Image (cartoon, grey):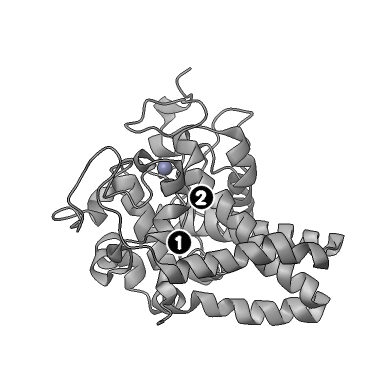
Amino acid sequence: MVLCKRYLLLTIAHKAQGLLDSSAYCEGTFMTSTYPSASPQGSQLPALNWTNVAFFGAFHVVALLVAPFFFSWSAIAVALLLHWLFGGIGICLGFHRLISHRSFQVPKWLEYVIATLGALAIQGGPIFWVSGHRQHHAFTEHVDKDPYSAQRGFWWSHILWILYPKPEFFDPNIYQKYAPDLMRQPYYRWLDRNFLMLQVPLGLVLYALGGWSFVIYGIAVRSVLLWHSTWLVNSATHMRGYRSFESDDGSRNCWWVSLLTYGEGWHNNHHAYPRVAKSGYRWWEIDTTWWAIAVLQKLGLAKKVIAMPSQQVSPES
Ligand SMILES: [Zn+2]
Ligand SMILES: [Zn+2]
């Protein structure tokens, strides 16, 4: 079996209009779907990808059945620290708000460092991730054109879209259409091909620091927790929670998803204003990704931070 790394990847989630100025990424006709559209259940299912099933299955087996034999509190701390570093900083702040939506700008060297942390999350490379996410916003909940459309049900938007990957998820023409800014940069193209290999030096460092216990918790347990955290943004926050804005989709604000995803669970807010750097608008809508952006701003490292339009400061009650 040819192991296609790109098919091992995945992503996060959301949708809406206007993300990074969707017009810049949606010129011409909409992406061509190979699926005859559009029953409420979604159209034809792509083929099950057994490589992906084996990959994700193996991680789950290690995290659920092997990890208990290697338990230590320090290993738990490593898993939680890397969940935040690769998930909170790499994915939420980096892949999502920085390079998908360009909600703020940082020096290029720092952007690449943050994107590398995102690549360590094993959610695909940056071009794959950003291209899919921009399609999610451009075609939110369309049964064929939104890669993780919640209209196809909870499990499709959560994980099945990865186990039944559509060929266009890995089509360079689609990448060129939705992520031309990243395709122009050699480092992003390299990272997109090699993100999985980054686990090797990470594993060696973890082994040196704490043996197999750190490797298992720092890679397998952390990855499984982080995958499901991220996927809940695709699935749960399009089904559960309250709405502050009448966006043209089913997005919701869900507090417990926000706790797991560093503020990304305020998903209705995000779909209403995809380019705004801050996702939590009410005082209780805790958004720790925003806190991290604010720290970068205080340090003079984050600039051109996009705020809510002044006339829209308060969400509708
Ligand atoms: Zn988004
Ligand atoms: Zn969404």
Can you give x and y, in whole percent of width and height, for residue 127 in the image?
39, 67
Residue type at mark 2 is: Trp
- What residue type is disc 1 on? Leu
Q: Are marks 1 and 2 in contact (CB under 8 Å)?
A: yes
Query: Who comes first in sequence, dot 1 or dot 2?
Result: 1
Q: Residue at x 41, y 77 (%)?
A: 4
Left or right: residue 187 versus residue 61 is left
Residue 4 placement, left or right of 257: left
- Residue 235 appears at what percent x and percent y? 47, 42
Q: Which x, y percent locates residue 113?
A: 56, 70
Q: Foreground residue, 111 or 272?
A: 272
Residue in view at x 45 percent, y 61 percent: 10
Q: Position of residue 14 (x, y in %)?
A: 42, 45
Q: Is residue 108 above or below residue 161?
A: below
The label number, if any, that marks residue 231 in the structure image: 2
Q: Quadrant of residue 245?
A: top left
Q: Read off the residue under disc 1.
A: 10
